[in-house]
Structures are given as structure tokens and as C-alpha cells.
Amino acid sequence: MNYLAHGYRFLDSPLFLAGTAVPDWLSVVNRRVRTRSRLVRPAVEGTDCNNVRDVGRGILQHHHDDDAFHRSESFQQLEAELGVQFRRGMPDRYDHRPGFLGHIVVELMLDATLAARDETLLDRYYSAMSQVDSTAVEWAVNQMATRTTDRLAWFIDRFREERFLDDYADDERIFVRINQVLNRVKLPVMDKTNIEVLSWARQLLLDRGQELLDVVTGQGTDCA
């Protein structure tokens, strides 16, 4: 799952919403900073600090939803279908991109599907995020993570300013964003022939995205 799919149900609780984004923010800022459930849960249960509690509960929600999502038959089928489509243009069996792209494109296009269904959703998402004190979130995360970071607040501010989730609505703009991800994980970027695969993936998720959302919303959790 990506930012919007993780958070769209929690726009009325900005700190909780921020918590649902924390693991993905940290994967960009510093992958060595991890917020594992075994560290976060006791911090949440043992604190009197609202910031730690709400951010931590959002992080736990993220992990709970990711687990249900990635284990689901629907996700695994869609991931495999997309991987096959990318493999046709990347036939080298040692090329790791098709499997990686199959995974992340399902997630990004699910966000695009959510935004397409409700034209107000992205504005409401970013409006809720704008209410969050980024420094407070960074401090709360540093009480629960495997190590501390001094770059999370900076990235939260940039995340809000750049609004890159808006780019998911367009095949060419999301192509650029995905190539930025490939570059960040040190994989070769895609060539433009793959825009056709992204267009196909967009329609696939418009048709079947609700299956993925149902997997998560149908799961009970004590995090919310």
C-alpha cells in the first residue's frame, strides 16, 4: 500500500494519519531507521504523550494493513500480472525490475484509483497533513525507532510542499516518479515504451482496485 491507501480513512486524525505514512517516509529518509511493531506497541501502551500515542497507533495501523494487503490473493495476482507485462520489455532474466515494478505499480495505481473516485480526496489528505507539526512527528518517531533521525521533519515538509501524489493521475508524470524510485533503489530507469504498461495498469486497478481495498477494510484491528 502507498500513502493515500494507508491514510484516506483517517483524515479526521492528523497525527494518526501521519503515523500511517511514517514507515514510507523513513524508507526515503533513511532505510536504517525502522519502526517495527515490537518497538512501537510498548511505546504506545506505556506513554502519556498524545503525540507518541497517536503517531505510534498510525504506524501500527500501517503495518497491520500492509500485512493483510501483501498476503492477499488479489494483490499477489495483480502483482504477478503486472510483472509479466513489464517482463515483456525487460527480457533479461537477471533484470530485477519487473518483479519490483509489479509490486510498486499496483500500490501507486491504487492511490491513483482512490483519487480518481473522489476529486476532493487529495486536497483533503494534504489539508489534514498540513495540520501536523513535522518536528513533533520526528520527535515521536525517535522515541520508537531502531535509531534516531534528524531528517524526517525536513522530509515531511517537502512531502507536503511537493504533492507528488497529484502526479499519479497522469501516465507520463507517474512514469517520471517511478523512475525516481528506481534510481533511489539503484535500479536502471525504464524507457518510455513502458508508459503503455502503466496505462494498462491504471485500467486494471480501476477495474479491480476495490478488491484490494476490501482486503484491508475487512480486517479487524485494535490500532484505530
Image (cartoon, rainbow, N blue to C red):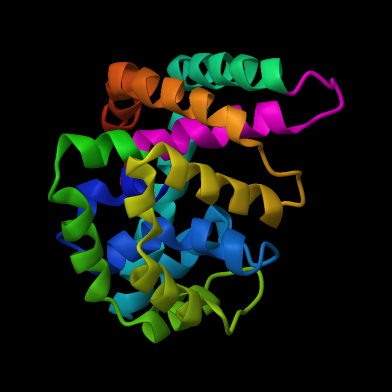
Note whether residue 143 is visible. no
Residue 177: image x %, image y %?
52, 50
Q: Residue at x 25, y 74 (%)?
A: 130
Q: Residue at x 18, y 59 (%)?
A: 123
Residue 159: image x %, image y %?
41, 68
Left or right of residue 93, residue 110 in this image: left
Left or right of residue 218, residue 205 in this image: right
Location of residue 143 with respect to 218 vertically, above or below: below
Q: Residue at x 69, y 44 (%)?
A: 189
- Where, quadrant-wise, is the N terminus in this rendering? top left
Note whether residue 41 is visible. yes
The secondary structure that most of the magenta stretch takes on is: helix
Identity of the residue furthest to the front in this view: 192
Q: Residue at x 68, y 56 (%)?
A: 184
Magenta-colored stretch includes residue 100: yes
Figure disc tally: 0
**89 or 122, nearer to the observer:** 89
Magenta-colored stretch includes residue 120: no
Left or right of residue 32, residue 64 in this image: left
Residue 19: image x %, image y %?
38, 62
Residue 172: image x %, image y %?
45, 41
**Residues rendered magenta in the picture:** 90-110
Location of residue 91 with respect to 218 vertically, above or below: above
**57 or 128, nearer to the observer:** 128
